[in-house]
Image: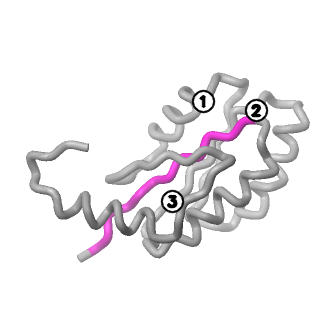
């Protein structure tokens, strides 16, 4: 049985120094059928955008990481919505750019969600 895809959306704004840790906490999950969608909500031509682009260049060849840049700062909610629009996954999770997931988080959540009867909606 194939594992359902899970998208983890990470909106980022003015915190490039913690972004790498957040991304790696997702890539190091025990559950492997994941994609990371980083939505850069920094304004273009700012130091934060430049630093974020530099960090994201490390992941440019990783097919599990997608990088989307807003054309201007829209706010965290808009960045989450942008990420959700790009997701093709059955499940979506959100992670702030200054936070991280425990390694088994997604595996435990998907296992529980897949066990629920069809009348449950989450």
Q: In the image, is residue 90 above or below residue 86?
A: below
Q: Which structural element holds mark 2?
A: loop
Mark 1 and 2 residues: CB-CB less than 8 Å, in contact?
no
Label 3 to label 1: alpha-carbon separation: 19 Å
- In the image, 86 versus 112, the foreground residue is 112
Quick one: quadrant of the N terminus? bottom left
The image position of residue 84, as x and y in percent, is: 46, 40
The residue carrying pointer 3 sits among few (fewer than 14), some (14 to 19) or many (20 or more) residues within 10 Å by Cα, namely: many
Label 2 to label 3: alpha-carbon separation: 21 Å
Q: Which structural element holds mark 1?
A: helix
The image position of residue 20, as x and y in percent, is: 73, 58
2 or 3: tag closer to the N-terminus: 3
Q: Which structural element holds mark 3?
A: strand
Q: Which residues are magenta?
A: 2-13
Q: Give the labeled residue for mark 3.
A: 35
- Which of the 4 image quadrants contains residue 58? bottom right
* Residue occupying image coordinates x 80% and y 55%: 55
Q: What label does residue 42 carry, if any? A: 2
């Amino acid at each position: 049985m194939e594992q359902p895809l899970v998208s983890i959306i990470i909106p980022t704004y003015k915190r490039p120094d913690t972004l790498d840790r957040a991304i790696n906490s997702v890539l190091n999950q025990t559950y492997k059928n994941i994609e990371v969608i980083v939505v850069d909500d920094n304004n273009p031509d700012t130091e934060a955008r430049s630093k974020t682009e530099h960090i994201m260049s490390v992941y440019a060849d990783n097919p599990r990481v997608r990088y989307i840049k807003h054309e201007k700062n829209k706010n965290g909610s808009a960045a989450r919505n942008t990420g959700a629009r790009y997701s093709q996954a059955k499940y979506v999770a959100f992670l702030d750019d200054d936070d991280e997931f425990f390694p088994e988080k997604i595996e435990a959540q998907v296992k529980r969600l897949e066990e629920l009867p069809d009348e449950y909606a989450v």
